[in-house]
Amino acid sequence: MPPAQVGPWLKTPNAAFDGSTPSQVVERGEMDHLCRMLYDLESGQPG
């Protein structure tokens, strides 16, 4: 993802996080969910 899109992505609700934004996931201390999503995307694993 281009660096300019990271900020908006962090603030956009995401179905993978039950409608929470990635920033909210981090704020709740659920960084493992975000890391898993990024790993799956990078490795080509289905979500």
Image: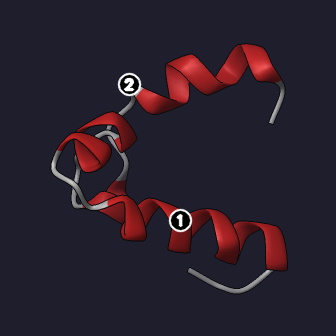
Q: Residue 32, position in %: x, y?
A: 40, 70
User: In which quarter of the view is residue 6 placed?
Assistant: top right
Q: In which quarter of the image is the N terminus?
A: top right
The three-letter code of the residue at mark 1 reads Cys
Q: Work out which residue is located at the far left of the displayed protein and give it.
A: 28
User: In which quarter of the view is residue 46 placed?
Assistant: bottom right
Where 45 sits versus 6, above or below? below
Where 41 sits versus 13, above or below? below
Q: Residue 36, position in %: x, y?
A: 53, 74
- In 3D space, how far apart are the residues under numbered discs 2 and 1 (Cα atoms)? 16 Å
Q: Work out which residue is located at the far top of the displayed protein and give it.
A: 4
Where 43 sits versus 29, above or below? below
- Crowd class of label 1 (few under 14; some 14 to 19; many from 20; radius 10 Å): few
Identify the residue position indicated by label 1 in the image: 35
The three-letter code of the residue at mark 2 reads Lys
User: In which quarter of the view is residue 31 placed?
Assistant: bottom left
Residue shown at 38%/25% (left/top)? 11
Q: Residue 47, position in %: x, y?
A: 56, 80
- Crowd class of label 2 (few under 14; some 14 to 19; many from 20; radius 10 Å): few
Residue shown at 23%/50% (left/top)? 19
Q: Report the front residue among 29 and 43.
A: 29
Q: Is residue 26 left or right of residue 6?
A: left
Q: Residue 25, position in %: x, y?
A: 27, 49
Where 44 sits versus 13, above or below? below
The local secondary structure at tag 1 comes to helix
Identify the residue position indicated by label 2 in the image: 11
The local secondary structure at tag 2 comes to loop
Q: In this view, does 2 lie to the left or right of 30?
A: right
In contact (CB < 8 Å): disc 2 and disc 1: no
Residue shown at 53%/30% (left/top)? 9
